[in-house]
Image: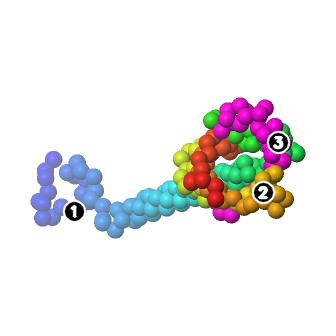
């Protein structure tokens, strides 16, 4: 076969054994839908990641609030104890505890009510402020400020107000936030 003169051959001439040369415009037309599909996929991935991140943040905030509510309740439990209802009050503290704190109150459960009865002690606590210090997985550290009005044989019926600052560690056990340790900042005032 005779080769045509390069200056006279058409661009689409299949005589050379090559595919016809496409015009740049038709390549762009085919590339545009592919490019749009890639952009759309990128946008969808971005939306999905944003939604998942928001859900994770919401779940974390919900957990923080649930732990903080449990800390507030346990602070009231720890500072609201009466010689009349001592066994029930201690059972409430133990039910909301785990670890060291639970062991400590279980050990005192037999002797503590007698001490309260002897002193005719009544304490009523009230949370002033509470906040989460840190949160990692199923552990939350909370800071609680509590005032408790305490009356006993020494103080009389009017009682005295004591100020407590508690640093609590809560652990999620079986879907419930339980207090594992309580440290008091300073002495009650």
| Residue where numbered disc 3 is placed | 118
Q: Residue at x 75, y 49 (%)?
A: 77
| Circle nearer the viewer, 1 or 2 | 2
What is the secondary structure assignment of the residue under circle 2?
loop
Q: Residue at x 65, y 63 (%)?
A: 129
Residue 59 seen in the figure: no
| Image coordinates for residue 106, horizontal then vertical, percent | 73, 33
Residue 128 on the magenta span = yes
The quarter holding residue 150 reads bottom right
What is the secondary structure assignment of the residue under circle 3?
helix
Residue 189 seen in the figure: yes
Report the span colored magenta.
101-130
Q: Residue at x 70, y 52 (%)?
A: 75
The 10 Å Cα crowd at callout 3, few under 14, some 14 to 19, many 20 or more, is few
Sequence-wise first label, 1 or 2:
1
Instruction: Determine whether, in the image, residue 134 is placed left or right of residue 22.
Output: right
Q: Is residue 21 above or below residue 103?
A: below
The circle on residue 10 is 1
What is the secondary structure assignment of the residue under circle 1?
loop
């Amino acid at each position: 076969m005779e080769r045509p003169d390069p200056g006279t051959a058409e661009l689409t001439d299949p005589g050379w054994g090559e595919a016809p040369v496409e015009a740049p415009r038709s390549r762009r037309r085919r590339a545009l839908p592919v490019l749009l599909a890639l952009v759309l996929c990128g946008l969808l991935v971005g939306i999905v990641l944003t939604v998942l991140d928001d859900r994770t943040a919401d779940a974390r905030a919900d957990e923080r609030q649930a732990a903080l509510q449990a800390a507030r309740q346990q602070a009231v439990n720890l500072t609201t104890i009466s010689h009349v209802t001592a066994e029930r009050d201690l059972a409430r503290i133990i039910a909301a505890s785990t670890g060291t704190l639970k062991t400590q109150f279980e050990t005192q459960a037999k002797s503590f009510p007698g001490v309260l009865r002897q002193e005719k002690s009544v304490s009523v606590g009230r949370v002033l402020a509470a906040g989460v210090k840190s949160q990692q997985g199923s552990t939350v550290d909370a800071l609680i400020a509590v005032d408790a009005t305490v009356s006993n044989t020494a103080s009389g019926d009017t009682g005295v107000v004591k100020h407590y600052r508690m640093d609590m560690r809560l652990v999620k056990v079986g879907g419930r936030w339980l207090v594992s340790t309580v440290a008091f900042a300073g002495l009650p005032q």
